[in-house]
Amino acid sequence: MAPKAKVNPKPSPSPTLPAAQSVPLEDLFAALHRHAQNSEYELAARVADQVLAIAPGDEDALRCKVVALIKSDAIDKALSTIQASRHLPIHLRFYEAYCLYRQNKLHEALKVLDGQERNSMILQLESQILYRLGKMDACMESYEKIQRFKIDSLDLKTNIIAALIAAGRSAEVQETMDALKVKATSNFELAYNYACSLIEKKKYAEAEQQLLSARRIGQEMLMEEDYADDEIETELAPIAVQLAYVHQLQGQTEEAIEAYMSIINRNLSDASSLAVATNNLISLRGTKDVSDSLRRLDRLIEKGTGARQFQLANSLDFKLSTRQKESLYANRLLLLLQANRLDQAQEVISALPEMFPDSVTPVLLQAALLVREKKAAKAEEVLIHYADRFPDKSRPVLLARSQIAAAAGHFQISVESLLKIPEIQNMPATVATLVSLQERIGDFSSAAAVLDSAIDWWKNAMTEENKLDLIMQKAAAFKLNHGREEEASQLYEKLVKSHGNIEALVGLVTTAAHTDLEKAELYEKQLKQLSGLKQLNVESLEKTPGARHVEGAHAVKVEVPEDVKKAKTKKRKRKPRYPKGFDPANPGPPPDPERWLPKRERSSYRPKRKDKRSQIRGSQGAVVREKHDSIAPATSTSVNGPSSKSGQNTSSSSKSGSQKVTSSEQSKASSKSKKKSRS
């Protein structure tokens, strides 16, 4: 956290300056000096113009004008003044590089500094440019050169600590602070940076206390300097964001979300802190509420102008580090993939390589897009091409390729990718993955070779947590499962002799029983007998054809300890669970025991009697003609068709037929007659 300069006070209005011709140069230079001492930089630039009108090319006046324009934040005017005076023999390269740095033209600024004498000012500017570019190793080299000048500046020492943390060298922070003779309590920026180093070392509780101390120190310092409350809140916003981040790392999700939302809702003028809080909130949410997360990021990322397709809003390109900007774009791309907006994701992917040419993230995101498009083979091709071009950055790329290939079922490609990363090849997780993949391929000899190579490596490894025993035990189990009893027995024997492991002893007895019976019997004596099996008669057990109940002299009596007996006798009384709304004091009548049976199978079931009143008595076909004639006109004049009763009567009239119409058939017949009448 680099310190921020206090806002310069506005110059008090002064009377109009007289014409340059009527004022001697000595008076103009005196006025120029007075305005510079009073931080009245705009008036100083106007007086410098008057001097240059009388004495064109005056080096002191020109230099004062450039500095005054820079101090008044008129960077464009300062740069144009420098470029207009290039024909003069005046050395202004440092100011030109600084103006380009302020315009975020970092590569151009470095080119201007090339060939310049490396004094303290040049080195400080160079280190800040390299810090902004994310080239932390080169940045630390510049700071190491600056320390030779023995500059006693607290701001410089604060920047050195910040660069050390950004370079991933947090372990050296305390030693460097001791060498620079500074403490974390010197100012709130140093306290903040020291807390960041504790976060990198995963000492989250200590980091939280240090951040609280930094906030207290900052409040006291800024109040002494007469800062307003809103200005103090803005200055200390990075500390608030970092406190929320510590809560996030500690798994305190609710507290972190509440802190991030509080920072965002306050809408502080510190745009960089708001951007970091928004990005962290989105990463904490994950795939929840993707649309809201995209809306929040779209406020920070907007369409670019010219060659750049995208740019950050609110001048964030000048305020955020390369790593922070890359995180914003990466999160937006992942959210677009989650929302299935593949066309927009493709636009972001095409712009990232140019924006972050030294980063491996763009190619990983491109592979993620190809996988989402179900082009796993194309993703594998893109990743291996990048790994071959940049072998020093190939590790994350090869790991991603291995994962994609394994998920796609390309196990051989996954194995080849892992074997190209020698620095992790013998780690337990990598060994387990390689063995599992080669087992799926059916290449058991290669899997055994991987285990043997890991065993040889761990034998010579000088590490605090040696994994030799773990690797040997897994290798022995693998070889035992694949018919290599002799090799498994040798591994188990080494484990027994080195550590006396019970599991290894059991494995040794099991494997030696197949290869060397005498050795198995020898090591079997080292096994402890299980309690409760002292009276077991092995001979009678062998004579039995199988497991059965044995009574008499050969019955096995297992001794059970008294405490176990007491534990068994004590049965836990569970409170009965009743249905909702049931009162055990007034249960009411008991439920019907036959409530689960079909109605026709219950004892209370009584079938319905058929209505025989409408049946016609007499011989077959004997129908009273008068009744038939009276029914015919009624059926012909009906608009809605016959009712279900007439259908039933008609079907039941054929009593002597071979088929009997059931109730379900009657209802079907009546419904058909209705449909016909409607048509």
Image: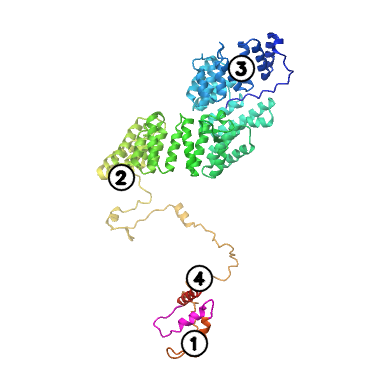
Tell me which colouring the rendered structure shows.
rainbow
Q: Position of residue 554 (x, y in %)?
A: 32, 57
Q: Label 3 neighbourhood size at 10 Å, few (<14), some (14-19), many (20+)?
A: many
- Residue in view at x 51 percent, y 41 percent: 335
| Residue under label 4 | 595
Examine the image and state in which quarter residue 464 appears: top left
| Residue under label 2 | 481
Q: Amino acid at mark 2?
A: Asn
- Residue in view at x 57 percent, y 29 percent: 319
Q: Nearer the viewer, residue 640 or 127?
A: 640
Does 482 appear above or below 547?
above
Q: Is residue 260 magenta?
A: no
- Residue in view at x 25 percent, y 43 percent: 515
Horizontal side of 415 relative to 55 (left or right) equals left
Q: Amino acid at mark 4?
A: Arg
Helix, strand or loop for the magenta stretch, by majority: loop
Q: Are marks 3 and 2 in contact (CB under 8 Å)?
A: no
| Residue under label 1 | 628
Residue 179 in view (yes/no) = no
Q: Nearer the viewer, residue 309 or 456?
A: 309
Q: Nearer the viewer, residue 458 or 176?
A: 176
Q: Cα distance, mark 1 to mark 2?
A: 91 Å
Examine the image and state in which quarter residue 238 appears: top right
Q: Nearer the viewer, mark 3 or mark 4?
A: 3
Q: Which stretch appears magenta? A: 637-662
Q: Are marks 1 and 3 in contact (CB under 8 Å)?
A: no
Secondary element at image label 3: helix
Q: Are marks 4 and 1 in contact (CB under 8 Å)?
A: no
Q: Position of residue 518 (x, y in %)?
A: 25, 43
Q: Cα distance, mark 3 to mark 4?
A: 99 Å
Q: Nearer the viewer, mark 1 or mark 2?
A: 1
| Disc nearer the start of the sequence (1/2) | 2
